[in-house]
């Protein structure tokens, strides 16, 4: 025989808070177990009694109180500012929103017309010089030497290793 279910599980079954598999297991058990069926019926009766008591405590306002409240609402006149706000709020909000949208649409290209930030070529040349002088390529390779003149144009000395330098020296000497 199946074990009896606790009040918490029966309450969850009553409020449909169980998984489908657990729900069908409890339903099957309630069909065969009289003790669990009585406890389930007691849980359902308590819930019904609480709902009925809550509805019984609901009371309606007396008609005189309702009449006074509605009379006070009708008597109160909105101020001039409230009336202007209610009439002109929509009429002013739409054009202002349109102006803001146009300003954003047309203002964005103007703000971005300066173009992207630029980096001068001398920065890259200086970085390259720094890296090549620190490069452990060996003694046979002389680092490139970059110079910049006042105009910002750059010229570079060619890479010459010691073997090429000797070849060049021999060729220069033979040509004399």
Image (tube, rainbow, N blue to C red):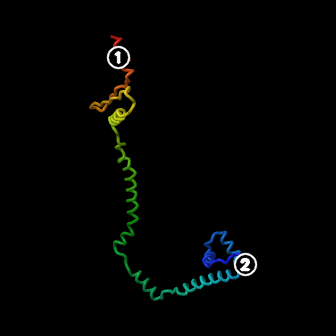
* The quarter of the displayed image where residue 7 is located: bottom right
Measured in 3D between alpha carbons, the distance from the residue under mark 1 to the one under mark 2, in whole angstroms, is 111 Å
* The quarter of the displayed image where residue 4 is located: bottom right
Q: Nearer the viewer, residue 38 or 160?
A: 160
Q: Tell me residue 32's x, y (percent).
A: 73, 78
Residue for badge 2: 32
Q: If the image is split into quadrants, where does the C terminus sit?
A: top left
Q: Tell me residue 19's x, y (percent).
A: 63, 69
Q: Which mark is residue 37?
A: none
Furthest toward the front, the residue is 139
Give the number of marks. Answer: 2
In the structure shown, which secondary structural element does the residue marked by tag 2 occupy? helix
Q: If the image is split into quadrants, where does the N terminus sit?
A: bottom right
Q: Tell me residue 152's x, y (percent).
A: 30, 33
42 is higher (above) or lower (below) than 164 = below
Question: Few, some or many C-alpha atoms within 10 Å of disc 1 (few <14, some 14-19, many ≥20)?
Answer: few
Q: Is residue 162 left or right of residue 57?
A: left
Question: Few, some or many C-alpha atoms within 10 Å of disc 2 (few <14, some 14-19, many ≥20)?
Answer: few
Q: Residue at x 34, y 73 (%)?
A: 80
* The quarter of the displayed image where residue 12 is located: bottom right
In the structure shown, which secondary structural element does the residue marked by tag 1 occupy? helix
Q: Residue at x 39, y 70 (%)?
A: 86
Q: Nearer the viewer, residue 101 or 31?
A: 31
Q: Nearer the viewer, mark 1 or mark 2?
A: 1
Q: Tell me residue 131's x, y (percent).
A: 36, 35
Q: Is residue 108 left or right of residue 43?
A: left
- Whichever of callouts 1 and 2 sits on the residue coming sooner in the sequence is 2
Q: Residue at x 72, y 78 (%)?
A: 31
Residue for badge 1: 169
Q: Is residue 60 left or right of residue 14?
A: left
127 is higher (above) or lower (below) than 25 = above
Q: Does the residue at mark 1 contact the one at mark 2 (Cβ under 8 Å)?
A: no
């Amino acid at each position: 025989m199946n074990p009896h279910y606790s009040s918490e599980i029966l309450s969850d079954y009553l409020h449909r808070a169980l998984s489908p598999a657990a729900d069908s297991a409890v339903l099957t058990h309630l069909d065969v177990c009289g003790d669990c069926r009585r406890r389930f019926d007691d849980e359902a009766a308590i819930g019904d009694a609480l709902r009925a008591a809550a509805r019984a405590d609901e009371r309606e306002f007396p008609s005189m109180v309702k009449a006074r409240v509605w009379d006070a609402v009708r008597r109160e006149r909105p101020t001039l500012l409230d009336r202007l706000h209610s009439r002109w709020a929509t009429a002013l909000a739409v054009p202002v929103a349109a102006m803001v949208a146009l300003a954003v649409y047309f203002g964005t290209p103007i703000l971005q017309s300066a173009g992207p930030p630029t980096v001068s070529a001398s920065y890259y040349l200086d970085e390259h010089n720094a890296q090549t002088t620190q490069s452990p390529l060996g003694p046979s390779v002389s680092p490139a030497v970059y110079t910049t003149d006042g105009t910002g144009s750059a010229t570079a000395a060619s890479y010459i290793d010691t073997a090429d330098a000797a070849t060049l020296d021999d060729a220069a000497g033979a040509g004399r």
